[in-house]
Amino acid sequence: MQWFKKQSRLRRLIILIALLVTLTCLCTYFAAPATEERPATVATNTPAPTNTPAPSNTPGPTATPAPPTSTPIPPTDTPIPPPTNTPLPTDTPAPTSTPAPTDTPLPPTSTPIPPTPTATPEPHAVAEALVRDALGIGNRDVDRVTAIELASDNWITVEWAINDQFTEGLIKTSAKMDVTDVARALCEADFCDGLTMHGSFSMRDVYGNVSEDIMVKVVLRPETLAKINWENFDYHDIYTIADAVDLHPAFQE
């Protein structure tokens, strides 16, 4: 208000006239009769017309509805995303044949199975295995071990075939080694209750007849076997310490 009072009369008059005109226009605008409803159309990018202020002392024109246009509704400005590259379906592998279910083992029972008792080998079988292992494989067309006998007092009798060698001396030496190897194997297994060994070899008489005859007979008593130190024993002495020896003339030294 102080500002208004400081103005000249002419300027205050002009200001009052301008205010009066403005109020008149506003009253005329709001007092105008309602116009018919315009159809809803979407205008193109043309801006809506602004209300032109009426000149002073002239009532403002009423708002004339805009005639409907046939302008199509433009598409929205939102861009449509391009289609993504959809991968082609891969070849689905053919189903493999399902193996037939195997027999499912039954779960173990809570009751433990008692161990099967191991059969104790017979002394005769043990002695025979020791003798065959000591003599090894023969090199003639006869059985290497022809007989093994275990008496009630554990005395063992062995009949075996002496292997052939390149010379007569080697054949005789081979017989001594056989007796020594068998006696040691039996004694180290606690079969030292006496041993008798009969060794055979193929002989030909003056008529050309060939036969398998006993060439060596050796007897070793239990007390004799107990005296032998097998780690240092020389097989050449087996006939010397034997309790009885019977040699065929062809096997005598």
Image (cartoon, rainbow, N blue to C red):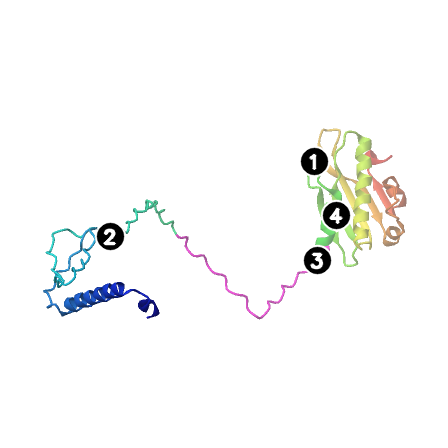
Instruction: Give the Cα separation between the discs numbered 2 and 3.
Output: 108 Å
Toward the front, the furthest residue is: 9
Q: Distance between the residues labelled 1 and 4?
A: 18 Å
State the image quarter where residue 223 is shown. bottom right
* Three-letter code, disc 3: Glu
Residue that badge 2 annotates: 76
Q: Number of callouts in the render? A: 4
Residue denoted by label 4? 131
Q: Give the magenta range.
A: 98-124
Earlier-in-chain disc, 4 versus 2: 2
Q: Earlier in the sequence, mark 4 or mark 3?
A: 3
**Residue 144 falls in image quadrant:** top right
Majority secondary structure of magenta residues: loop
- Which residue position holds label 1? 140
- Residue that appears at 79% across and 51% down: 186
Q: Mark 3 points at which residue?
A: 122
Indicate which disc, 1 or 2, sits on the residue closer to the N terminus.
2
Q: Where is residue 176 in the image (x, y as percent from the top left)?
A: 82, 40
Other-residue count near label 4 (Cα within 10 Å), few / some / many at <14 / 14–19 / ≥20 = many
Tags 2 and 3 in contact by the CB under 8 Å rule?
no
Say whether disc 3 or disc 1 marks the residue closer to the N-terminus.
3
Of badges 2 and 3, nearer the viewer stands: 2
